[in-house]
Image (spheres, rainbow, N blue to C red):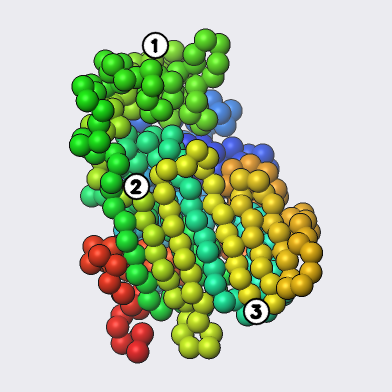
Amino acid sequence: MLTIAVIGLGSRGIHYADLSLHRGGVSFTALCDINPEKIHNAVAALGDSHVRTFTEEDVFFAAGKLADVLYICTQDRDHFRQAMKGLELGYHILMEKPVSPNPAECIAIAEKAEEKNLHAFVCHVLRYSGFYRRIKEVLEEKLLGDIMLIRHNEHIGYWHYAHSYVRGNWRREEETTPMLMAKCCHDMDLLYWWAGQKCESVSSLGGLSWFTPENAPEGAALYCKDCPHASVCPYNSADQYLPHDGQPPKFPWGTYALTPSREPGDIEKAALEGPYGRCVFHSDNDVCDHQTAQLRFGTGRQEIPVLFSVSAFSNKCFRDTHIFGTKGELWGNDDEETLMLQLFGEEPQTLSLHLAKAGSYGGGHVGGDSGLIGDVLDFLEGKDVPMERLTPIQETVESHLIVRACEESRKLDGKRVFVHGEEAGK
Ligand SMILES: NC(=O)c1ccc[n+]([C@@H]2O[C@H](COP(=O)([O-])OP(=O)(O)OC[C@H]3O[C@@H](n4cnc5c(N)ncnc54)[C@H](O)[C@@H]3O)[C@@H](O)[C@H]2O)c1
């Protein structure tokens, strides 16, 4: 039976633990989180009071290797440090993205894993979803001929953006990563996977244009609970996070995102008086609320141009993709979970997703979360899962290099930047 340790018992850590339990054939031997309430909740969720628990990272690592696999689900700036310590001790690693704002740290983890003959997988969950795997299959089967253009857009959702990037964990670049790294290293990874070749150069524009004090309505208060505009503001924290006239809160991922406490009084306090109660125009956020990029994968005859956008300003949270080839088009969005194929001169056809050789369908990220856990645990158990189906750290480096180049370009007002250095682009 595979044994698992988890560091970071927030939404992702608990979710992966839960998916692993549902899959079965695993046992949790150690849990670590700096917040004792999160440990308490995790032990209750796992239903195992014998698991070893730690509230200090140093004590956890000093205890030696306690499991076959370590899930690293802490915040963005912790992953590198903890992955290096875990590999040193002999754990296989399953770590959250982004790995680090600095791609050199991805390379260091890859080298450490190779030195220790261990595996380090990154949670690029979209690669494990039936929807995205079907796109990859169509491209591999060359149904579209050669790819001439990819348009890919990420719509964050105004409520999700406000929660995560204005009031929450990913609002300040120096504490986490740029928005493009936090949100779109997934997209850069998908584009690299679909293109089947490295990104040569990028040009990117973007910034923070709306969630700033100068856009606050006149007389807006610092907290929604005191604001005269609250009843007409789509970001009103009470509407987002608290039930209303028998209706559930608008924010779909539950109030645990605000506080580990289950007490209604604590949740209300967090929603009204804590960081999530702040006016979205008066927070201390500095990450982009929109960004676009033109990317060029490969060069010459093999070149694949990509137009990418990400924006806070949408009702729903989803991605849409349109791929143009020499023989036809493929398009779809992961909210509706439909993929359409139309070869030139023929009628459009809806592709059936269940025919894809995908991981189990259902759950978060269009089935990607459960697909990831299923495939990675199968692989570590020695089942026949090809490495091309997985997302080892060595694959992740490219997505992080692309994001870094986009950020460099954005700060130079869209100047073309070579992803692998100017020499490589010549
Ligand atoms: N793969 C995906 O699609 C996806 C989606 C959302 C978030 N993420 C990433 O997953 C990671 C976790 O996100 P989350 O939403 O679960 O965050 P979270 O804040 O809910 O959870 C992080 C947990 O880590 C704990 N922690 C912080 N420092 C620690 C330390 N030194 N030692 C042990 N525990 C520590 C916190 O107390 C918290 O419980 C982030 O890096 C995030 O960017 C990935």
Residue behind mark 3 = 326
| Residue for point 28% across, 18% down | 227
Front position among marks 2 and 3: 3
Q: Residues within 10 Å of mark 3 (few under 14, many from 20)?
A: some
Looking at the picture, which amino acid does disc 3 mark?
Answer: Thr
Outermost residue to the front: 345
The image quarter in which residue 105 lies: bottom left
Query: In this rendering, does residue 388 appear at all?
Result: no
State the image coordinates of residue 102 (x, y, percent, origin top left).
30, 63
Looking at the picture, which amino acid does disc 1 mark?
Answer: Gly
| Residue for point 57% across, 69% down | 194
**Is label 3's Cβ within 8 Å of ligand 1?**
no
Looking at the picture, which amino acid does disc 2 mark?
Answer: Asp
Query: In this rendering, does residue 321 appear at all?
Result: yes
Of residue 79 and residue 329, the one placed in the foreground of this image is 329
In the rendered image, which quarter contains the C terminus? bottom left
Task: Report if the CB atoms under discs 3 and 1 are less than 8 Å apart.
Answer: no
| Residue for point 33% across, 77% down | 418
Q: For the residue labelled by badge 1, is the local secondary structure a helix, a strand or a loop?
A: helix
Residue behind mark 2 = 289
Q: Which mark, by number, is residue 179?
A: none
Say if 77 sits above or below 112 in the image.
Answer: above
Front position among marks 3 and 1: 3
Of residue 229 and residue 238, the one placed in the foreground of this image is 229
Disc 3 versus disc 1: distance between alpha carbons?
Answer: 60 Å
In primary-sequence order, the first of circles 2 and 3 is 2
| Residue for point 31% across, 80% down | 421
Front position among marks 1 and 2: 2
Residue behind mark 1 = 265
Disc 2 versus disc 3: distance between alpha carbons?
Answer: 35 Å
State the image coordinates of residue 19 (x, y, percent, origin top left).
61, 41
In primary-sequence order, the first of circles 1 and 2 is 1
